[in-house]
Image (tube, grey):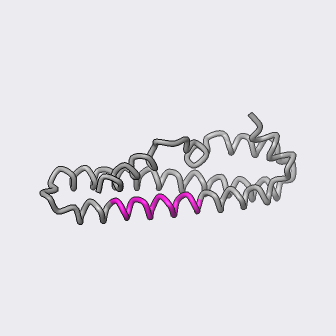
Amino acid sequence: MLITILTILFLSGGASTGWLYDFGDMKKQVKTVVADDERKDAALALVKELKARAKAERKSVKSMSKQLENAIAIADGDDSQLLYLGDQFLDNTRTYYVDVLDLRFELKQIITREEWTAAYAE
């Protein structure tokens, strides 16, 4: 059980995950660097989808964290509910990570290498 809880804590903020949640400037960057209107519109649609997916994930994490808190508070030696919630949380997190990576790869196929570098070079 301890391993599950530590894994949940690690995945929910123990590592740098900004690239998975912070899409605030993407819209502005795409509008600035992509000249072709058709590609710009396609890229902006993906950015919108990324932002919506991140918002839904934050809501899900908040809900699952509350469920986990409640389960910990009432646990009386039976870890089955905690393990179930931990597994569910990890599955949802894994699915989110895959979705975000897929969307970013789609975005990278729409935007040229030069535009990508201009938009995301730091």
Where is residue 80, by image quadrant? bottom left
Instruction: Between residue 3 and residue 62, name the one nearer to us.
Output: 3
- Residue that appears at 81% across and 57% down: 39
Give the quarter of the figure containing the C terminus.
Answer: top right
Q: Residue at x 52, y 59 (%)?
A: 96
- Residue at 35% across, 54% down: 3
Task: Estimate the x, y position of residue 17 in percent, counting from the top left.
Answer: 55, 44
The span picked out in magenta is 86-99
Left or right? Give the position of 119 relative to 36.
Answer: left
Q: Is residue 50 above or below residue 33?
A: below
Q: Is residue 95 left or right of residue 112?
A: left
Residue 34 picture location, percent across and down: 83, 47
Which residue is farthest top? 122
Residue 70's spot in the image, x, y percent?
21, 52
Q: Point out residue 116 in the picture as x, y percentages from the top left corner.
A: 80, 47
Taking depth in this image into account, of 29 and 22 the one nearest to the observer is: 22
For the N terminus, give its image quadrant: bottom left
Chief SS of the magenta region:
helix
Relative height, residue 87 to residue 14 (above, below): below
Q: Residue at x 21, y 56 (%)?
A: 71
Would you say 53 lies left or right of 108 here? left
* Residue found farthest to the left: 76
Q: Is residue 95 magenta?
A: yes
**Numbered marks: total:** 0
